[in-house]
Amino acid sequence: MKTIKVMQKTKAMGFYVAVMAALMGAGTAYAQTGELGIRTGASFGSLHSGSDAVSGASGKTGLHVGLFARTGGDFYFQPEVNFSTFGGQYAYNGSTYEPAFRQLNVPLMAGYKLIDNDQLNFRVSLGPDLNLNLNSPDAPAGTAYKRFNLGGVLNAGIDVGRVTFDARYGLGLTAMHEGLEQRQRVFSLSVGFKIL
């Protein structure tokens, strides 16, 4: 039991270090003729399970809000720090569960601008996404969702002047719940504004 708590604390500490690195990277990115902005939108999440004991899975809509930095030219780096919510519903052993997630997400994306001029940019990006659960979602008795999991994101976006529009798909690469073999999948739409 003590070993599990030490491992959980180590993972949490690693996540906090990654968040700090992303924030420092964002500051460095901006200092190197980059952009800094805010973003918000809707998240459409679901939990996909590899277990036959889980049935009737469906997703619930949530929200997200965050900060982004972008540096580079046609090829760019875009770290973000986002607070997001989403939920799901599923049946397991005759009971229904409705977990609601509140997460801190840190996507670290590399991208390419397909069209790049002063007033209009079309861009695509992808990269890893570090996710930290900030709450304890509803789970079957004696089980729990992991505090930390790793995902990947694929993003397509348009910048019109200082306004940004993004569509993003996030796929869980590690299980959020080992016993239920669940991985998160989140599609999100957002609008943002470049502050600097």
Image: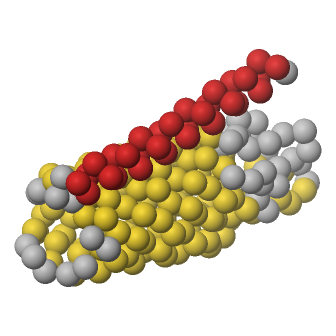
Is 6 displayed left or right of 91 in the figure?
A: left
Q: Using residue 123 as the reference point, say whether residue 146 is left or right of it.
A: right
Residue 185 falls in which quadrant of the image?
bottom right
The outermost residue toward the top is 3
Q: Residue at x 47, y 65 (%)?
A: 66
- Residue shown at the point (62%, 56%) measured from the top left: 103
Q: Residue at x 63, y 36 (%)?
A: 12
Which residue is farthest front? 31
Q: Nearer the viewer, residue 145 or 39?
A: 39
Check the picture and name the quadrant holding the C terminus: bottom left
Q: Is residue 24 above or below residue 86?
A: above
Which corner quadrant of the image does residue 137 belong to?
bottom right
Q: Is residue 118 visible?
A: yes
Residue depicted at 29% across the width and 80% down the height: 163
Residue 90 seen by the camera: no
Q: Is residue 34 above or below residue 176?
A: below
In percent of width and height, residue 193 lies at 34, 77
Residue 134 in percent (x, y) is at: 69, 52
How many labels, in total? Answer: 0
Q: Residue 88 appears in which quarter of the rendering?
A: bottom right
Task: Please identify the quadrant where the N terminus is shown.
Answer: top right
Q: Position of residue 41 (x, y in %)?
A: 49, 75
Judging depth in this view, the residue of 58 and 36 nearest the camera is 36
